[in-house]
Image (spheres, helix red, strand yellow):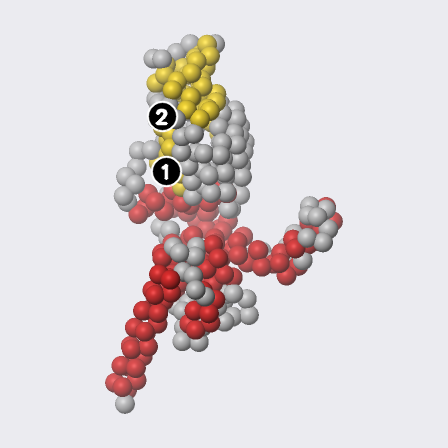
Amino acid sequence: MQYRESDTEHGVLQYNIYGETAQVTGYRGKDTELAIPAVLDGCAVTCIGKKAFLSNKMLRQISLPESVVRIDDWAFAYCAKLNKIILPYHRMEIGQGIFKECFDLEQIVDEGADERESKTTDIAYLLAASMNILDAFYLFDFENAGKSDWLVQWDNRMQTVMEREDAEGFSKMLLCGEEDYGSKENNLDYYTEQRRREKVRLAMLRLMHDYGLENSVRAQLEAYLLAHIKGCRTEETWKVILEEYGDDLKYYQFLTKLGGVTADNFQPMMEDMGESHTEMKAYLMKYHSEQSEEQDAFAAFEL
């Protein structure tokens, strides 16, 4: 074994040479995007070693070459800002917890796919969600990701999550002392609201990346979101969009397409937005005005 280092744009990649292959063992530096080379010192890079990028606070995107056939335990765990990983969708050995608590991870993209295709984007989002939202390691399957059977399994797992009681796990959490006594997490109302928010995020993700989604499942997800819009008994759909995606236009476009902005809840939405989110307010005001004009024209036609 020979220990070596290779300079990156803003850091240093560490690796070991084993005969004719190389194993990435570590990294130090400030790169936000990093492409692991396929060859180092004339040796094919075949493995990302245990804890190689553990707890990196800078990386947002990393690309792995076709030559990689193994990713060891916790290789990318606790990478707080890691948003996208590009890797080959082929058979490889996967260790435990490789993306543990990578909460910002949104896309796991096929290194050989055309990222301009909506199908490619949808599968990339669904594959990432199988790890950090659905907690379904069995869906982390590069060879079958996107195939009809895989999509059915993904949607079945999603429906299991969606159908859980909102209070499930609350009593166990208290008994196990997982939260500090007296904290807001120990409040049942707060706990159930967080579970509904999780379901809202999951439903929105699947509807926004709807490759292979059956109409019956689509209807169930839309119904759940509409049951939690502004003006309903609980308003998690609106709260997630406003508080977590406050100035991201595509979520407001999604909400209007869903039918979540109505004559009854439009003004309360404006009040919630206050003096902030100027562009989003302008979009909703334009949408509301157009809807009102259409309704007036239809009423005049009926007369």
Q: Quadrant for residue 88, please give it.
A: top left
The percent position of residue 240, horizontal first and vertical second, equals 48, 58
Q: Determine whether, in the image, residue 230 is placed left or right of residue 207.
A: right
Residue position marked by numbered label 1 in the rendering: 109
User: What is the three-letter code of the residue carrying label 1?
Assistant: Val
Q: Quadrant of residue 215?
A: bottom left
Q: Is residue 109 visible?
A: yes
From the viewer's side, name the closer residue of 51 and 150. 51
Q: In the displayed orientation, state which residue is furthest to the bottom.
A: 303
* Mark seen at residue 284: none
Near-viewer residue (120 or 159): 120
Disc 2 element: loop
Q: Position of residue 191 (x, y in %)?
A: 62, 56
Res 95 visible? no
Residue 91 place in picture, x, y as percent: 41, 29
Which of discs 1 and 2 lies nearer the camera? The answer is: 2
Where is residue 192 shown, x and y percent of the image?
A: 61, 58
Image quadrant containing the C terminus? bottom left
Q: Secondary structure at mark 1?
A: strand
Separation of marks 1 and 2 at Cα, in angstroms: 23 Å
Q: Locate residue 196 relative to residue 288 in the image: left or right.
A: right
Relative to 164, is 70 above or below?
Answer: above
Q: Residue at x 38, y 33 (%)?
A: 33
Residue at the image position 42 percent from the left and 21 percent from the top: 12
Q: What amino acid type is highlighted by mark number 2?
A: Glu
At a point 68% along the width and 53% down the height, the residue shown is 183
In this view of the protein, which residue sits in the foreground, 28 or 66? Answer: 28
| Sequence-wise first label, 1 or 2 | 2
Q: Count residues near mark 1 (Cα–Cα under 10 Å), then give few for <14, some for 14-19, many for 20+.
A: many
Q: Which mark, residue 9?
A: 2
In the rendered view, tell whether residue 259 sits above or below residue 142: below
